[in-house]
Image: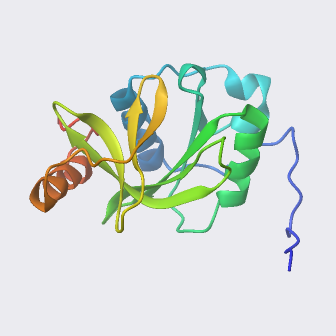
Amino acid sequence: MKLQPLTQFEVNQPLMSWTPRPVMRRMAEFQAAMGANVDLRASRRQPLFTNTLVMPSAKLVMAGTSCSRPMYLRECELLADVSQSDVLLLRHDVDRGASFDIRFRDSGQWSCCYLAWWHPYDGLWLIPTAGEQTFIRAGELGLTRATHAPFADARRREEGIVRAIETSSFTGGR
């Protein structure tokens, strides 16, 4: 059964509603840790990109929310279609930190509930919360899938996740 949307999307209107300041701050911190450049005029050219970070060199659009899943997945699918880019949806929770939902442009499928993992030598990664899913490296050229984990064991996995949650930036600095 196909569900009909309650509201129609307008191409000349922002898709993402007002984004709280803590969410925008976390988005900016993640983008800075990636090292990707942001197109500051994207929302002027296309209002759909208001409240998002468009990173053309990384072929990535990042949106953020403090809402839980599955909110904003459909809106982000439209962002992916319009931009022909991957989409990263940061979900910020004051108590639990940030989690991520990723939609790669080539597969069109969502990978949900990823956590940031950071290490000084291995950089910034998105890792699944459970299971043997794909690991994703986040860098200035975008998101790259990998089948191997960036950590050696469960303790190192936990340390990297804690660093990404407890510090004020995704690079482990204060």
Task: Using the image, determine if residue 129 lies above or below residue 56.
Answer: below
Name the residue rendered at 88%, 47% in the picture. 10
Percent position of residue 87, x then y: 60, 43
View extreme (front): residue? 147
Q: As drawn, is 71 to the left or to the right of 21?
A: right
View extreme (left): residue? 155
Task: Using the image, determine if residue 39 lies above or below residue 88.
Answer: above
Q: Quadrant of residue 169?
A: top left
Query: Tag count in the figure?
Result: 0
Percent position of residue 135, x then y: 38, 49
Query: Which quarter shows the C terminus?
Result: top left
Task: Using the image, determine if residue 3 lies above or below residue 38.
Answer: below
Percent position of residue 142, x then y: 49, 30
Percent position of residue 81, x then y: 77, 41
Query: Which quarter shows the N terminus?
Result: bottom right
Name the residue rendered at 27%, 49% in the picture. 149
Name the residue rendered at 63%, 65% in the picture. 71
Task: Using the image, determine if residue 162 lies above or below residue 48.
Answer: below
Q: As drawn, is 89 to the left or to the right of 35?
A: right
Q: Quadrant of residue 133?
A: bottom left
Name the residue rendered at 40%, 35% in the picture. 138
Relative depth, front residue between 26 and 90: 90
Q: As drawn, is 23 to the left or to the right of 108?
A: left
View extreme (bottom): residue? 1
